[in-house]
Amino acid sequence: MTERKVPLRTCVGCRGVKEKSELIRIVRTPEGEIRTDLSGKAAGRGAYLCPQRGCLELAIKKGGFARSLHMTLTAEQTENLRRELKEFEERDP
Ligand SMILES: [Zn+2]
C-alpha cells in the first residue's frame, strides 16, 4: 500500500485550501520584485492564489499578499499581477 501525500496550500485570496498544483504561485524575488511563478520553483518568498481574478482582487483588498509576502504591493505591482493573471487565464481556457 502506498500513500501519496498531496501538498496543500492556502489561497491568499479566498483562504481556501487546495492542492498546490491547482494554485499559481506568486513570488517575491530577492530583488523585491513581485511576479507570477508558473514553474513554482523561483527563489524567494511565495504566496499561492487560485488562478481567478476574484481571488486576486480579494487578496489585494484584504491584504493577503502583504501578510504572506511581508511587504505592501505598489500600485504598479498590483497592475502587473492583474495583467499576468489575465494572460494566464487566456492561455489556459
Ligand atoms: Zn482562492
Image (cartoon, rainbow, N blue to C red):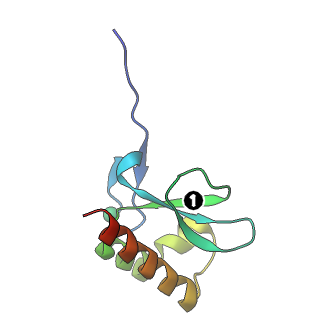
Residue 57: % across, % down:
36, 79
Q: Secondary structure at mark 1?
A: strand
**Residue placed at 39% from the left, 60% from the top?**
11
Which image quarter has ligand 1? bottom left
What's the residue type where badge 1 is placed? Gly
Q: For residue 71, what is the image quadrant? A: bottom right
For the residue carrying disc 1, how many other residues have a C-alpha within 10 Å: few (<14), some (14-19), or many (20+)? many
State the count of labels.
1
The reply, left or right, for residue 82 in relation to residue 34 is left
**Residue placed at 32% from the left, 57% from the top?**
16
Tell me, yes or no, if residue 74 can be seen here.
Answer: yes
Residue 73: % across, % down:
57, 82
Tell me, yes or no, if residue 14 can be seen here.
Answer: no
Residue furthest to the right? 31
Residue 55: % across, % down:
33, 71
Residue furthest to the top? 1
**Residue placed at 31% from the left, 71% from the top?**
90
Residue 39: % across, % down:
53, 53
The reply, left or right, for residue 71 in relation to residue 54 is right
* Residue matched to label 1: 46
